[in-house]
Amino acid sequence: MIVTKSLEFSYDNNFIFKFPNINLKSTENLLILGNSGIGKSTLLHNLAGILRPKSGTINIFNNDISKFSEYELDKFRGENIGIIFQKPHFVNSLTVGENLELAQFLGRNKRGDIKLTLESLKILDKINKKPKELSHGEKQRVSIAIAIINSPKLILADEPTSSLDDSNCANVINILKEQALKYAAQLVVITHDSRLKKHFKNSLDL
Amino acid sequence: MSIFKLSLKNIFSRPMSSVLSIMLLSLGVSMISLLILINTVLKEQMDNNLKGIDMVVGAKGSPLQLILSSVYHVDSPTGNIPLKEAKAIENNKMVGYSVPLLYGDNYNGYRIVGTNSKFFELYELNIKSGNFFSKDFEVVVGSKIADRLNLNLEDEFISSHGLRETGEAHANNPFIIKGILEFSNSVADQLILTSPESIWEIHAEHDHDDEHDHDDEHDHDDDEKEITAMLIKFKSPMNIIQFPRYINEQTNLQSAVPSYEISRLFKLFGFGIETISLLAYLIILVSGISIFITLFNSMKERKYDLALIRTLGGTRFQLSLMLIYESLLLTIIGFFIGIGLSRLSIIFISKIMDANFNYSLNNTGVLNDEWWLLIVSIIIGLVACLIPSIQVYRMDISKTLSDE
C-alpha cells in the first residue's frame, strides 16, 4: 500500500514541485508518466527516501517515511525497496555475484538465493564476471537482480526502457512484471516512454 | 560480504596506486625501524661490552680510537706503552683493578690478545672445554671463532703479524689451542687469548740475534717490554674525575673514559640518524598524501558505486567506514612490510659487519619505538581518509543519481 498526500518538493525554494496524490492498493502496479524536467526522478527519489519532501506525507506499507531519520530511511530502503535506474549501476570492484552478496549484506537480508535469482534472469553464467565485462542487456539484467535479491515489497524503476528498442522494451518490462509477481512486490515505473502504457492498468500523468 | 571485505576488494581493484602507497609507507617505516634497530642493538652491545671499565690507558692518539681498539676490538691500537709505566699506574692507590692487553698478531683476521686471568674475571668468561693457557704459545679461543674456523683442542695454528690476515707469518712459533670459551655475548667471543709472554716472545725473536748473557737479558727485557693498553676500574667512582686528567697531563700516556667516548660517538651518529629519520618521516608523509589522493580521485570515479551502496540500504556511516578501512589497510600492510624489510636488512648488515669487523648484531623482536611507528602509521592513515570520508558522509546521492 503506497499513499502520498499533497506531496511537495523543492530544491531551492524558488520552484516547487507539486505531485498528484498516489493511492495504490497492495497488489497494484503503477506507471507514472511525464515529460523530461517535470520532476519524475525527484518523485522517485522521494518515494525511495533518497530525498525528503518539503511538505505532505509519504506512507509506504503503513510507515510514514517522511518522518524517518536518515538512518531509518537507509534501513527501510535496504529492507523494503529495490531500485532500478535508467543506467545500471554497480560496485565495479566486485563481481556480479559479489554485488548481489553486498546487496544482501546492506539490506540486512539473507533470504534471497543469488544463483536462483541470476538463473531466473538467465545470467547465471555471469556470476564471476566483473560488471565492465558485461553487455548492456546483461548489465540491465544484473541491475534488476541487485534490486530484487532482497525480495523487496516495492520495486521502483526509473526510465528502465527509454534507451531500448521496441522488442527489448517489451522484454524488460515483462521481466520486471514477472519478477514483481514472483516476489509479491509492487512495481512502480516512472518514465516518459508512452510505449509502456499498454502494460499497466494504473497510470498517473505528472 | 562485509564492509571490510568490500574495502579489501576496492584496494585490489586499483593495484597500481595501492602498491605505490604501500611501497612508500613501507620504505619510510623500514628506514626508521632500521635506524631504531641499529641504534638500539649497537648501544646494547656497546654497553654490554663495557663491563664496568672506568678508564683505558694507552699510547697517545685519538681517545675514541683507543676505546674502539681496546674495549671493542674494532679499530687499530694507538701504539704501545712501556710496561714500567703501566705497572706504575697499576700500583697507584686509586686503581682497584687493571687488565693488561697486548696486541701484535692475528689468526685469519681474529685478534690474538695477550692478557692475564683478570681478563677472564672482567668478562666473566667460562671455559667450555679444555683449560686456561699456562705455558707460552698456549691459547684459549672465543666460541665464535671456534665455530667459524672449526677449531678443536690441541689444534695448532700459525699467526700472522699485525691485525690483518695479510701480515707476515710467524712460522717458527705455532700457537696451540688449550681451551675453548663458552659463548658470552661479549667481545671475547671473537678473540684469541694468550699470555703476555707469548706475544713478547714471538716479537722478541727478531731482535734477539745479538748475544746476551741470560741474567742480563732478563733485567734488560723488563725495561723494554711494552703492552698495548690497560683496562682500569677505580676503587672509588670519584677517581674518574681526577685520575684521567692526571695521566693525560703528567705522563706520556693517554687515558680515555669509555662511557664518555661512546656517548660522544653516538652524538656524532645522532646527527646522521636525525637527518635520515627526517627523510623517512617525509616519505611516510608522502605516502599519506598518496593515499589521500587515491581515495579522493576514486570518489569521483566511483560516485555511482557509492550512490548505489546507499540506495541498497548502506548508511552514510558504512560508506565512511569503507574509506577508513581502505586507508588503514594500506597503512597497516605498509607498516608490516616495512618492519619485515628492516629485519631482512639487519640480517644483511650484520653479515657485512661480521665479515668486515668480526662484529655481529643480535636481532631482536619488535621494539617499543616500533609500536610507536605503528601508531604514527595509523594516524597518517586516519588523516589521509578524513576529508574523503567526511565528503562521502555528506554526499547527495539524489544529485549524483540525477547526473547521468
Image (cartoon, rainbow, N blue to C red):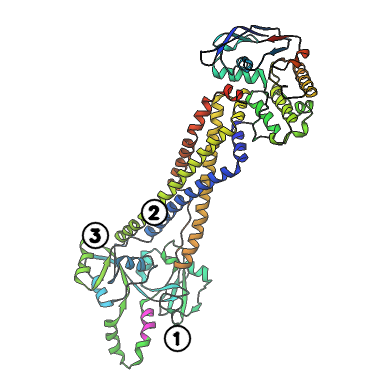
Is there CB contact under 8 Å for labels 3 and 1?
no
Q: Which residue is under mark 1? A: B172
Q: Which residue is under mark 2? A: B273
Q: Residues within 10 Å of mark 1 (few under 14, many from 20)?
A: few
Give the chain of mark 2.
B
Q: Which residue is under mark 3? A: B236
The three-letter code of the residue at mark 1 reads Asn
Give the chain of mark 3.
B
Q: CA distance from mark 3 to mark 2?
A: 36 Å
Q: Which residues are magenta?
A: B198-204
Secondary structure at badge 2 equals helix
Q: Return the x and y of residue B139 as percentages of the image width and height.
A: 44, 75
User: Viewer-nearest of labels 3 and 2?
Assistant: 2
Regarding residue B313, the answer to whether it shows in the image is: no
Residue B302 falls inside the magenta stretch: no
Judged left or right of residue B17, residue A149 is right
* Viewer-closest of A12 and B267: A12
Q: Earlier in the sequence, mark 3 or mark 2?
A: 3
Q: Are marks 3 and 1 on the same chain?
A: yes
The three-letter code of the residue at mark 2 reads Ile
